[in-house]
Image (spheres, rainbow, N blue to C red):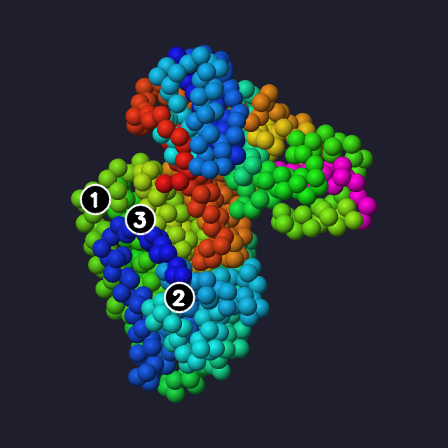
């Protein structure tokens, strides 16, 4: 019995397909697509091909992420918070705090000893606590987003970036460059500032061991190390941190079938849209 | 190019009585304008200042300036006033009620009359402004700043409450004496402005009416303990208008008599706000999001009803000792007793009277989850909210969440983020109940 989870973010769509034992049969990360997010269905198609499955063979499909609402082929939609909690319960049962750093926002999620969501918090309506912050600054510095982590580790010290506004931080970065700071020092400073904001947000929940970092931000080794400094102890990172939402969605689909939950509506094999 | 008309953002009410409040709001502003034209004295005034019955006894027509900001937000007509105040130099971090009030006064002065299509006809130019220190700090300075736009006398009173860990027996007399002096100062000012003396018998009458309305309000809230709940929080945020802005009038008593009867009927006949009440929610605090009150109906679409709130009806009825024979002294006693109502309980438990009140509500109203609203520009209701939430979590494991925006400034609101957060909150409730 296969179950699929599809996590549709503003830029990337992530799909995970699991069997009745929760073993991952296939997973895929691909672009959501700019215009009407029509590529989300393509990512789903490719993941099914990878698993050798068709829509009809999937017992349950759960959608999550910002684009979860208008998914014609899902059986149920669940928020990312519940999905993250579900997959982390499977991957790291000792985790009590999840810090999810996505492109559009960051979240802190507190789990109880059974892995259920006790409390959660989301970052302010501001890019400063989201992956977009680093994306904008990477462009300003003329470096790739994926290079930032390793690059920051080359710095012996970091340059303090005090602005929390992305636009102002961009100005601050160019000022620091003009003053002679190196790019690694600046990137390390950005990570320090960014980690400070997201860890501080999670402190509202009461930080306790273990802590896991998920989302695109977890792929940035410099940011993870800065978060560890702020938390005060090592944090965990899943093998593929971008997939935790989709994996949780697939596992929840498995749970729903076990509990006899029926789909909310009939599936339509059509493209996803964020619009009416 | 004209602005595209927006979808309605107000909430669907649960009771007939609450639907009648809209006319009372209109009457506050249009009625005040008419009263002034007839030569009556009109005063800008502030909610929860403890002086409401004094104004009514002196026949001063009250114009609630904070409520006007809420009205502008509910009508989504706040930007022009906020931006005007900001253009006049007031910071965006200043209370948005204050900014709307000052922006409105500034525009009215510039235009030499009411701003075009001002909600409910606009606020008339007052004869006086009556500030207070109760609740928050900008209120003490707001009307002083408004003096920039109009040459109108201002009087602000101090409303004091002792800290929690005070020996109330030791400080009671001092606080009551001080509060009485504050009220007497206000009365002297009103006598000067109106040219008439305060009639103590008339003051006793308005106090009795005020206490009666508030007692009925309290009794109505007690009825909301029933399942299903017969009156939701969006109604509460309407009925605070007769409770506060008509305080000391027969009109308020009549309103609450009707409301009580309606809610009682619904409880007896098990008529709930929605057909299937799955989750009972406590509005934990923070000024309501006047710009987006439909959000309460959005919660209801998931079976979640806001059954009680820690806002506006800030105190339960109190018993002033029978030896108090003077109405001004009575008001001073009442203010003291209201503001120290849970001090002793807090001392013995959490140390925080608000936490004590929330814990009582969670128990009495069989609460499944708590939602707080943090308002970016309201320090009084937002500072400490996370601490209160954390303190509460030491006593209960029910899900809690904090939505962030502002009471009236829409620039601090994100619908997508709220919906995502509400979705996760509902899932947490569902997981817990499973």
Which residue is nearer to you in this view: B226 or B433? B433
Mark 2–mark 3 Cα distance, whole angstroms, equals 23 Å
Foreground disc of the pair 1, 2: 2
Instruction: Relative to A82, say whether B290 is above or below.
Output: below
Mark 3 Cα-neighbour bin, 10 Å: few <14, some 14–19, many ≥20 = many
Instruction: Relative to A130, say whether B91 is above or below.
Output: below
Is label 3 in a helix, a strand or a loop? loop
Location of mark 3 (residue): B232
Location of mark 1 (residue): B271
**Dot 3: chain letter:** B
Is label 2 in a helix, a strand or a loop? helix
Left or right, B424 with respect to B10, comes to right
| Percent of width and height locating residue A115 | 49, 25
Q: Which quadrant holds the C terminus of chain A?
A: top left
Which range is magenta? A179-199
| Percent of width and height locating residue B288 | 41, 54
Image-quadrant location for residue B398: top left
Location of mark 2 (residue): B68
**Dot 1: chain letter:** B
> First in sequence: mark 3 or mark 1?
3
Residue occupying image coordinates x 49% and y 61%: B96
Is label 1 in a helix, a strand or a loop? loop
Left or right, B113 with respect to B350, comes to left
Mark 3–mark 1 Cα distance, whole angstroms, equals 12 Å
């Amino acid at each position: 019995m296969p179950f699929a989870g599809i996590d549709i973010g503003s830029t990337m769509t992530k799909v995970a397909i699991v069997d009745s034992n929760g073993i991952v049969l296939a997973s895929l990360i691909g672009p959501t697509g700019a215009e009407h997010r029509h590529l989300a269905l393509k990512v789903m198609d490719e993941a099914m091909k990878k698993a050798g499955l068709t829509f009809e063979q999937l017992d349950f499909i759960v959608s999550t992420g910002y684009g979860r609402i208008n998914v014609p082929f899902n059986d149920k939609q669940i928020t990312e918070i519940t999905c993250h909690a579900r997959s982390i319960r499977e991957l790291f049962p000792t985790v009590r705090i999840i810090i999810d750093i996505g492109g559009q926002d960051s979240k802190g999620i507190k789990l109880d000893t059974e892995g259920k969501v006790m409390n959660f918090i989301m970052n302010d309506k501001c890019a400063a606590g989201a992956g977009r912050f680093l994306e904008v600054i990477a462009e300003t510095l003329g470096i790739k987003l994926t290079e930032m982590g390793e690059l920051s580790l080359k710095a012996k010290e970091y340059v303090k970036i005090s602005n929390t506004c992305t636009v102002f931080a961009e100005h601050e970065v160019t000022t620091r460059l003009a003053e002679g700071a190196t790019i690694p020092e600046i990137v390390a400073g950005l990570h320090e500032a960014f980690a400070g904001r997201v860890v501080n947000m999670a402190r509202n929940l009461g930080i306790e061991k273990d802590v896991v970092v998920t989302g695109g931000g977890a792929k940035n080794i410099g940011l993870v190390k800065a978060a560890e400094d702020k938390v005060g102890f090592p944090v965990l990172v899943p093998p593929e941190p971008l997939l935790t939402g989709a994996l949780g969605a697939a596992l929840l689909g498995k749970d729903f079938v076990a509990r006899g939950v029926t789909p909310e509506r009939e599936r339509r094999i059509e493209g996803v849209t964020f619009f009416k | 190019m004209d602005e595209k008309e927006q979808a309605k953002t107000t909430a669907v009410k649960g009771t007939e009585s609450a639907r009648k409040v809209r006319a009372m709001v209109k009457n506050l502003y249009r009625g005040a304008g008419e009263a002034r034209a007839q030569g009556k004295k009109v005063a800008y005034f502030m909610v929860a200042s403890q002086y409401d019955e004094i104004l009514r006894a002196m026949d001063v027509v009250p114009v609630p300036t904070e409520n006007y900001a809420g009205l502008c937000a509910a009508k989504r007509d706040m930007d022009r006033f906020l931006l005007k105040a900001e253009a006049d130099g007031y910071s965006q971090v200043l209370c948005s009620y204050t900014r709307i009030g000052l922006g409105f006064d500034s525009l009215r002065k510039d235009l030499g009359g009411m701003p075009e299509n001002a909600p409910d006809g606009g606020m008339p130019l007052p004869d006086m402004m009556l500030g207070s220190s109760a609740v928050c700090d900008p209120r003490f300075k707001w009307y002083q700043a408004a003096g920039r736009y109009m040459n109108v006398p201002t009087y602000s009173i101090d409303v004091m409450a002792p800290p929690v860990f005070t020996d109330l027996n030791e400080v009671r007399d001092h606080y009551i004496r001080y509060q009485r002096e504050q009220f007497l100062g206000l009365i002297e000012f009103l006598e000067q402005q109106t040219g008439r003396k305060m009639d103590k018998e008339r003051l006793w009458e308005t106090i009795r009416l005020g206490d009666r309305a508030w007692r009925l309000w309290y009794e109505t809230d007690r009825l909301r303990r029933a399942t299903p709940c017969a009156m939701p929080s969006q109604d509460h945020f309407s009925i605070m208008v007769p409770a506060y802005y008509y305080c000391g009038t027969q009109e308020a008593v009549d309103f609450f008599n009707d409301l009580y009867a309606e809610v009682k009927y619904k409880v007896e006949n098990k008529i709930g706000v929605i057909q299937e009440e799955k989750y009972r929610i406590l509005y934990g605090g923070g000024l309501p999001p006047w710009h987006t009150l439909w959000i309460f109906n959005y919660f209801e679409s998931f079976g979640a009803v806001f059954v009680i709130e820690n806002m506006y009806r800030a105190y339960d009825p109190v018993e002033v000792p029978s030896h108090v024979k003077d109405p001004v002294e009575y008001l001073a006693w009442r203010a003291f007793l209201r503001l120290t109502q849970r001090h002793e309980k807090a001392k013995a438990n959490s140390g925080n009277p608000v936490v004590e009140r929330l814990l009582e509500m969670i128990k009495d109203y069989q609460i499944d989850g708590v939602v707080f609203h943090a308002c970016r520009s309201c320090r009084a209701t937002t500072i400490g909210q996370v601490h209160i939430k954390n303190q509460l979590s030491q006593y209960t494991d029910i899900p809690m969440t904090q939505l962030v925006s502002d009471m009236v400034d829409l620039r601090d609101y994100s619908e997508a983020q709220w919906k995502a957060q509400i979705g996760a909150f509902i899932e947490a409730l569902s997981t817990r109940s499973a």
